Image (tube, rainbow, N blue to C red):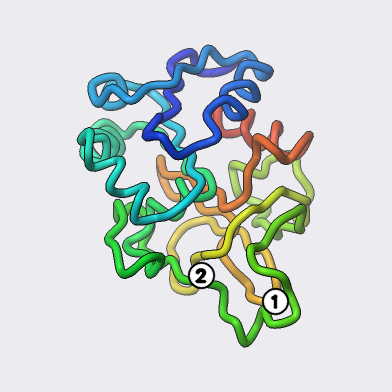
Amino acid sequence: MTNTNVTIIDYGMGNLWSISSALQYLGSNAVISNDPGEIHNADTLILPGVGSFRKAINALKKNNLDQSILEAVKTKGTKLLGICLGMQLLGTESTEDGLTLGLGLIPGRVDKFNPQKTKEYKIPHIGFNLVHSRTDAHLFKGLPQAADFYFVHSFRMLADGLIGKTAICNYGDAFLASYEQDNIFATQFHPEKSQTNGLLLLKNFLTL
C-alpha cells in the first residue's frame, strides 16, 4: 500500500532508525541514503533532523545534498516530508547560532520561542501536545482536529502569512506544527515517536 521508493536523507543529524522502523511497520521499503544521486532520483524523500540548524545546513552542503533535494522537489515534483529540524531546514533562514539561510521551500523564519510568551513554560519544549489542524489537511486525514503529537525543540516557525495548509500548536507561543503545500510537507513534531497518531500521519503521507 505504500511507496516502495522512499529515501530517508542521511546527513548525520537525524533519528534515522526510528523513522525507518516506523516506515517498515507501515509496509514501506524505505532506504537510508547520503548519496546525492539516489536522493535526486527518489520518488519520496524524508528529511529528519535533530540538533543545530547551522551545523545541519553545513552538513547538507558538504555533500551537495541541499542541491539534490532542491532539484528533486522543484524540478521533478518529488514528495518531501521534513521532520523537526528537517522542517526548520526547509525555511528561509534561522537565527540559531547566528543567521543562516535555509533551503527556502517554506517561506518562514526559524526563531527561538518568544520568552515573554513562554516564561511559564520549560524550554526546550519536550513532550506530547495538542496540534490543531485543518479539516482538509492531507497529513491529518482520519485524525481529530486536535490530536496529540510528540515534540522536542527550542526553536520554531510561525504560521503568519503562510500560504498552504498549516497546523498550530500552542506552547504559550502559538507556532507552526505542520505545513503542506503541493509536494512539500513538514512537521515540527516527531510522528515516528507519536504512537498511533504519528503512524497514521506517516501512512497518510506515504499514500498521497
Label 2 to label 1, Cα distance in Å? 13 Å
- Whether residue 125 sits left or right of residue 89 in the image: it is right
> Where residue 154 sits: x, y (%)?
57, 64
Looking at the image, residue 105 lies above or below residue 11: below
The residue that appears at 38% across and 51% down in the rendered structure is: 90
> Where residue 147 sits: x, y (%)?
77, 51
Q: Are marks 2 and 1 in contact (CB under 8 Å)?
A: no
- Whether residue 102 sits left or right of residue 112 in the image: it is left
- Whether residue 1 sits left or right of residue 88 in the image: it is right
Q: Mark 2 or 1 closer to N-term?
A: 2
Q: How dense is the environment of label 1, judged by Cα within 10 Å: few (below 14), some, or many (20 and up)?
A: some
- Front residue of 182 and 49: 49
> Where residue 124 sits: x, y (%)?
63, 63
- Front residue of 137 and 189: 189
Q: Which residue is mark 2?
A: 158
Q: How dense is the environment of label 2, judged by Cα within 10 Å: few (below 14), some, or many (20 and up)?
A: some
Q: Quadrant of the image for the N terminus?
A: top right
* Farthest residue, direction bottom: 116
Q: Which residue is mark 1?
A: 172
> Where residue 27 sits: x, y (%)?
63, 13
The residue that appears at 24% across and 33% down in the rendered structure is: 68
Residue 197 image-quadrant placement: top right
- Front residue of 205 and 33: 33
Looking at the image, residue 38 lies above or below residue 141: above
- Label 2, secondary structure: give it: loop
Looking at the image, residue 65 lies above or below residue 99: above
